[in-house]
Amino acid sequence: MSDENMPGPESSSEQVSQKSDDFQREDAQVPQDANNSDAGEKYEESSAEVTPKAEKAERSSKGKPTAMHARVVSGAIYALGTVACLFLGTWPTAILIAVMAFLCCSEFLKMSRRSGRMPNDVIALVFAAVFPFAPLSNISDAEFFVIFALLVVCACWYVSTPRANMGDVALTVFGPIYTSLAFSSIVIIRDSFPSWRGALLTFAVMGSIWLSDSTAYFVGSKLGKHKLAPRISPNKTIEGFWGGLAGSVLVWIIVFLLRVWNINLVYAIVCGVLVNIAAVAGDLFESRLKRGVGVKDSGNLMPGHGGMLDRSDSLLFGGMTAFLLLRLGGIL
C-alpha cells in the first residue's frame, strides 16, 4: 500500500470530529422532539380546559339581563310610579316632581363643577325643591315670587363671598330654573283639573314625550342613516326625529278623540308637532351640556338611561311647551 492511500493524522482527526458532531446533533434531536410532544400535549390539555370554561361563561351570560332589558325595566318602573302619583292627586304629583327636580338639579351642579365652576349647591337645591310647590299656593303667579327670592338670595351670597364669580352665580340661578321651574309645568297642568281629567291630561302630555323618545329610538336604530346633530349627539338621526314626531302627534290625536277637553284636531296636531320639537331641543341641549364637560351620562341612577336629568331632559322643554300651548289654546 502506498503512502497516498494511507490516512494522515489530520484526516483522522477531522473524521473523528465530524462523527462526534453527528452524535451531538442526534442527541440534541431527541429532547427537542420530546419537548414538541410535551408542548402538544400541554396545548391539547389547555384547549380542553378552555372549552368548558368558555361554555360555562356563555351559559352564565345567558341568564344576565342585557342593556335593553335594564332600560325597559327601569323605564317601566319610572313610568308606573309617575302615573300612580298623577292619579293619586295634585300633592303626590308635586312631591314626585320636586324629588325629580332635586335630583336633576344635583346632577346639573355636578356637571357644572366639572367645568371648574363653584355654584352654591345649597341655594340651588333648596329652590329646586320649592318651585314645584309654588303652583299649589294661594298666591297668584307664585312662581315669580320664588324667582325673585332666588335672585335676591344669590345676590346676597355673591356680595358676601369674595371667592364667588359671575359664572358661579349664573349657574346657581340657572340650575333650579332649568331643572325645576320648567318641571313645575307638569304640576300646573295637573292642578288645572283636580279630578281624573287633570291626571289624564298630564299623563297624555308626558306620554306624548315618552312615546316620542321611544319611537325615535327604535326608528333611528333600525332605519336611521342621516345624522341629526352629529357633533352634539351622534346617535340621533333625522329618521328617528320623524319617528318621534309621529309618536307625539299620535298621542295628541288621541287627546282630541277622547273629547274630554275642548281641543280641535288641527290644534291637537300642532301641539304634537311643537311639543316634539321642544322635546328634541331639550334633549340636544342636555347632550351639549354633557359634551361640554366630557361625560356620557349625567348620572347612573337609572340603568340603561343614565341619570334623572338624562331621563327628564326632553320632558323639561316639552312639558313647558305643552303648558304654554294649552294655556294659549284656552284648554287650561
Image: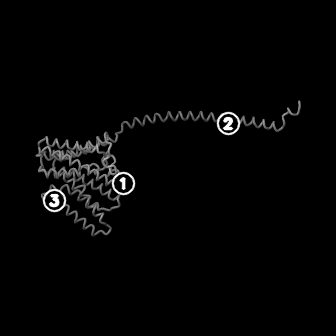
- Mark 1 = which residue? 294
Which of these two is toward me, 24 or 281?
281
Judged left or right of residue 122, residue 261 is left
Label 1 crowd (10 A; few <14 / some 14-19 / many >=20): few
Q: Which residue is mark 2?
A: 28
At horizontal 35% and vertical 61% (from top left) the residue drawn is 116
Three-letter code, disc 1: Gly
Q: Is residue 135 above or below residue 197?
A: below
The residue at 19%/53% (across/down) is 185
- Is 329 or 51 nearer to us in this picture? 329
The extreme front residue here reads 226
* 3 and 2 marks in contact (CB < 8 Å): no
Measuring from the top left, give residue 283's x and y in whole percent. 28, 50
Q: Nearer the viewer, residue 140 or 73?
A: 140
Amino acid beneath label 3: Ala
Q: Which residue is mark 3?
A: 142
| Mark 2 crowd level (few <14, some 14–19, many ≥20, 10 Å Cα) | few
- Residue 231 in the image, given as x and y percentages of width and height: 34, 51
